[in-house]
Amino acid sequence: MVTIDNAISISDKAKVQVHKLMRDAGFGDDPSYFLRVSVVSGGCSGLSYKIDFDNEQKPTDQVFEDNGIKVVTDLKSFLYLVNTTLEFSDGLNGKGFYFNNPNASRTCGCGESFAV
């Protein structure tokens, strides 16, 4: 297991929402669960973000923690996500998680897809 500190930051608003979703899913008190973040092919700009809860780490996963949230990503996704911040918006322009990714050269209008 490789541990990398602060590769993905978690904003305070995102932290609150992650904890709420984990409680709602029934495993908020189970320390074996973590937030899995990945980058997959697709979307109008070529790459899309994927976030989910998981409790199985793979040998090549990159594991780190920020703001009290354990975050795990596969090695390929990690290369796209270095120094990215997971944010949460509950404003009038839309509600949900989004990524503030300094590695993205362009993003699409929906904010769910990007290119490097």
Image (cartoon, helix red, strand yellow):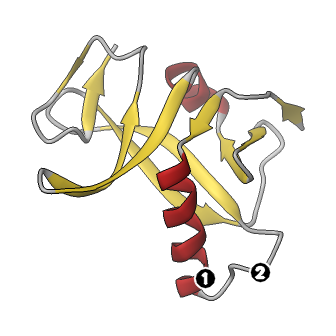
Residue 14 lies, with reference to residue 45, above or below; the image says: below
- Cα separation, mark 2 vs mark 1, equals 7 Å
User: Of label 2 and label 1, which has the lower sequence position?
Assistant: 1
- Tell me which amino acid carries mark 2: Asp
**Quadrant where the image shows the N terminus:** top right
Label 1, residues with CA under 10 Å away: few <14, some 14-19, many ≥20: few
Residue 103 lies, with reference to residue 90, above or below; the image says: above
Give percent across and percent down for residue 55.
74, 66
| Proximity of marks 2 and 1: CB atoms separated by less than 8 Å | yes
Disc 2 secondary structure class: loop
- Tell me which amino acid carries mark 1: Arg
Give percent across and percent down for residue 9.
60, 35
Image point (68%, 47%), residue name:
71
Query: Quick check: 103 left or right of 107?
Result: right
Quarter-wise, where is residue 107 in the image? top left
Image point (48%, 41%), residue name:
86
Give percent across and percent down for residue 30.
79, 78
Give percent across and percent down for residue 73.
64, 41
> Along the line of sight, which residue is nearer the eye, 79 or 12?
12
Image point (43%, 49%), residue name:
50
Query: Quick check: 93 left or right of 91?
Result: left
**Quadrant where the image shows the C terminus:** top left
Q: Which residue is mark 1?
A: 23
Q: Which residue is mark 2?
A: 29
Q: Which labelled disc corresponds to residue 2?
A: none
